Image: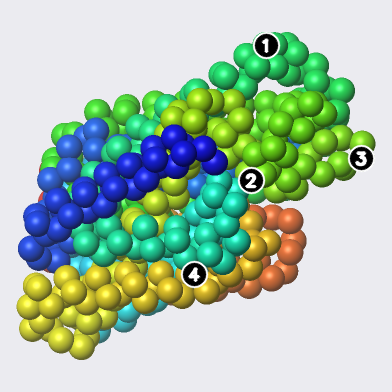
Amino acid sequence: MSTATLVTFIIYLIGMLLIGLAAYRLTSNLSDYVLGGRRLGPGVAALSAGASDMSGWLLLGLPGAIYAGGLSSAWIGVGLAIGAYLNWQFVARRLRNYTEVANDSITVPDFFENRFRDNSHVLRVISALVILLFFTFYTSSGMVAGAKLFEASFGLGYEQALWIGAIVIISYTFLGGFLAVSWTDFVQGILMFIALIAVPIVAISELGGWNQVMQTVGEIDPSRLDMVKGVGVLAVISSMAWGLGYFGQPHILTRFMALRSSKDVPKARFIGMTWMILGLYGAIFTGFVGLAYVSDVANAGNLAEFGVKVVTDGGVQMLDDPEKIFIAFSQILFHPVIAGILLAAILSAIMSTIDSQLLVSSSAVAEDFYKAILRKNASERELVWVGRISVGVIALIAILLAYNPESSVLGLVSYAWAGFGASFGPIILLSLFWKRLTAPGAIAGIIVGAATVVIWKQLGTGLYEIVPGFILCALVAIVVSLMSRRPSNEIVAEFDQAKNM
């Protein structure tokens, strides 16, 4: 890596830490730390939701999947775009209103407990346990992505790269909480967007145009040009089913809850969906063009000069790790200063998700365990520090899980995404749209959804575990609710109040 690239990269990191310090001065209580005092504008909320959603998966995992499997892997992007739109359209406004009406709920477990008047705290604790379980894996995926970035860019060993990336990310989340996370996500979302547009355009130009790219990929393997050919029904269903995950992702739902007004939802939806769709196109094109680029012997030689490992597979030059294709393009195609900005964009994608996940996990510890069960009279300052300490502990566990250098970013993300989508997705939807849902129904649904994902993953059926998990969670929640006592008049009145806002 050149000096100019390194300096640009370091300036970016210092800027993110300064934002964390600024937010630290504005964080005085747990609501500020966890939800930013419900004062996010539509632009910040939209880009923050998008950046925290897409993560290193968008710049490493998805381009890597397209690089390895061709356009047949693009079905994931189609499913995600549909799911994200439906989430903004049907969940955002109603959740923003309902969480305010339901005793100003500031976390997903908090909302569940207040929504159902669950004085036993069972629903809150089970929800918090699910968050801690799956977010540890989700955070670990970000740590792996960060390690791959530092390893490929700075020539570090995997373990050393893992710790350096983790320390940077933990620092500003620890300091500033939700405001630091949202403000940095806004900056990071813009950086990611520019990177995803610029990289494939420059790469296509370098190869002589789109027709040349298509011809080269067709010569390598014609099936990679077709989204449908050679793709089974199960594979398409599994890829499209990623969209179901949106309804249950706590780090995205909290952005809806933090909007300053539900009237901002249409504008936020437009900004967020535009950003997402163009970003997905950029990621897909990056992986596709990468296959054509690396297959050229001369280009493969240039990559080797930058420390990018290239191997021969079936007579074709291939990256040893497909998930590093965006990193490779950033270094070889651009001026060192621009390369530094693009590498910062990759780190942005990683940081913007990990910080959100750490924050939601720490809020589960501070709000849903410590305050609700251990110390009901805990001061706001005490709760903020419990949240900060939790960030460090959870991050440490995620780092230990990420110690395997063979870990796949996409693999870890898919497991956590399924866990939240199947556990919380149906319960969030039923909570907002069906007044007959009860606490026992919600508890049973969450447990069945989480258990199904864990068990189904071990079976290796080829069907993405979110599909059976989501269906079983919804069915169990409905059946148990119909078998249990009807919600009280107070709960029904609150449901109607939120609906009519």
Amino acid at circle 1? Gly
Give x and y (percent) for residue 171. Answer: 30, 61
Residue drawn 44% across and 30% down? 337
Can you say whether 191 is above or below 136 in the image? above
The kind of secondary structure element at disc 1 is loop
Can you say whether 31 is above or below 497 in the image? below
The kind of secondary structure element at disc 4 is helix
> On the image, numbered disc 2 is attached to which residue?
323
Q: Nearer the viewer, residue 62 or 374?
A: 62
Alpha carbons under labels 4 and 1: distance apart: 42 Å
Residue drawn 13% across and 78% down? 382
> On the image, numbered disc 4 is attached to which residue?
399
Lateral position of residue 222 relative to residue 58, left or right: right
Residue drawn 69% across and 55% down? 463
The kind of secondary structure element at disc 3 is loop
Alpha carbons under labels 4 and 2: distance apart: 19 Å
> On the image, numbered disc 1 is attached to which residue?
209
Say whether disc 1 or disc 3 marks the residue closer to the N-terminus.
Answer: 1
The kind of secondary structure element at disc 2 is helix
Could you say which quadrant of the image residue 363 lies in?
Answer: bottom left
